[in-house]
Each structure stands twice: as C-alpha cells, then as structure tokens.
Image (cartoon, coloured by chain):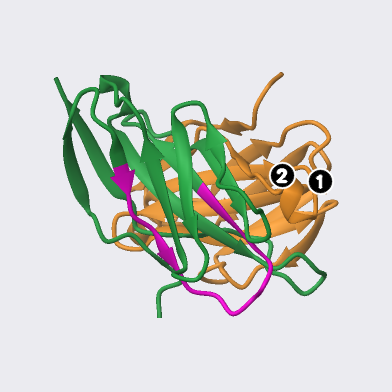
Amino acid sequence: DAGVIQSPRHEVTEMGQEVTLRCKPISGHDYLFWYRQTMMRGLELLIYFNNNVPIDDSGMPEDRFSAKMPNASFSTLKIQPSEPRDSAVYFCASRGGRFLSTDTQYFGPGTRLTVL
Amino acid sequence: AQKITQTQPGMFVQEKEAVTLDCTYDTSDPSYGLFWYKQPSSGEMIFLIYQGSYDQQNATEGRYSLNFQKARKSANLVISASQLGDSAMYFCAMREGDSGGGADGLTFGKGTHLIIQP
C-alpha cells in the first residue's frame, strides 16, 4: 500500500516567490495534517482537515500561508510570498479514524523548503 | 508550560544494550494518546508505538516497548538489544481528547538524538 505522498521533495526558491507543496494522503484516511519542522521550533502543527474541511488553522503562522483540500486525495499548502524564515521541512500526515484507538498519524517523506 | 518534555538531547549507547528514552507529558484531559516516532538522518517520520491513556497494559511492538507510568505522567520508550540502525532522532508526541472537543493534532517533544556505537 502506498503511504502518504508529498511533492516536491526539495524546493529552492527566492524570497517573494510563490511556493506550493502537495500531499496525497493514504487512501481511505479522512484526516490530513500539515506540520512544519525547524531547528528552533521543532515540529509544529500548522493546519488539519477532516473530510476535506479545515478544522483548525490556528497554527498557520501568517496570512501568507494557505491550505486547501479540494478532494479526499489531494491537499496543497501554499506560501505567497515566501520569506527566508519559511525555510523548513514541511510534513503532511494522514489518519484513518477519530478515536484514539485508530489514532496513528502516518507521515509523508516531507518537503525540504529553502527560501533564499 | 511544555506539554511534552524530553530531557535527553543526546544519548550514546553501546550496540546490543537496552536503551530507555525519557518522556514526560502534561495534560488535564483524562483521555489521551501517546506516540513515539523515529526520524533517521534521511528525514522521514516513522511511527514506532502507541499507548492510550486507558490501556491497562504497556504497549509493545517488537523490540520497542513503552513504560507507561500514568501517575507520574511518563511514557518512556525502551529499545531492547539496540542495533546500529537504531541511531536516529526519537520524538515523543501526544494527542489529547477522544470526544468532539479534543484536539486532533499531535504535540511533539524536542526529541532525543540516539547514537548507537559498535
């Protein structure tokens, strides 16, 4: 079975450019999460969706960040305009159930973003 | 206050020895889940083991076990018979709540960098 798929794996861009990160969750999972990992702040939740609906975006750092999930098999995280401090590894994760017994989140390989 | 505390930034362990990675947590929610993930140098996050707050027994998965002490709010990961391939960052994480008001995202600790020496 395919795990969570993210693209691109690496992205290098210049300050001010638009960046779009993509994620395909595990088939049948109804929760999708976006996390960011930096040396300074560690792993932090940005936003998550349930059945394609954004539930909590309180972790999104600024209005420059936006996320969408147009269908059950695809999500995007967009940064416009990008800044050097956005450089990080961005992870997408998915989960198949609401209750703790089916709680495990499975992570994609991550996108390493570098903003020059 | 931190919700997940991992007090060991780094550890060196001899191959084949057992390893205990510490994790303490803070929550007032009676229903929560605790997780351990492994992040090798390649960067991916690999799920290792899960413990629910109502589970009566400590979780085990192969060489991994979770020493769950609810009263002390600790959830230490034990790796038996360590191998060179166990060298990685290890993260403890928590999800609070099982009802509609619970938070669904994971809160992570800062991690422990484990190095297994031959």
| Sequence-first disc among 1 and 2 | 1
> At x 50% / y 71%, what residue is drawn?
B71
Quadrant containing the N terminus of chain A is top right
Q: Position of residue B48 (x, y in %)?
A: 51, 36
* Separation (CA) of disc 1 from disc 2: 6 Å
The boundaries of the magenta stretch are B20-35
Q: Position of residue B57 (x, y in %)?
A: 61, 48
Q: Position of residue B112 (x, y in %)?
A: 29, 49
Q: Is residue A106 magenta?
A: no
Chain letter matching colour orange: A
Residue B49 image-quadrant placement:
top right
Give the structural element (helix, strand or loop) at label 1: loop
Q: Are marks 1 and 2 in contact (CB under 8 Å)?
A: yes
Q: Chain of mark 1?
A: A
Q: Chain of mark 2?
A: A
Task: Name the one closer to the observer, A102 or B77.
Answer: B77
Q: In the visual, does B13 lie left or right of A38?
A: left
Q: Which residue is mark 1?
A: A30
Q: Which residue is mark 2?
A: A95
The image shows residue B41, relative to residue B35, as above or below, that is above
The mark tally for this picture is 2
Which amino acid, by three-letter code, is at mark 2?
A: Arg
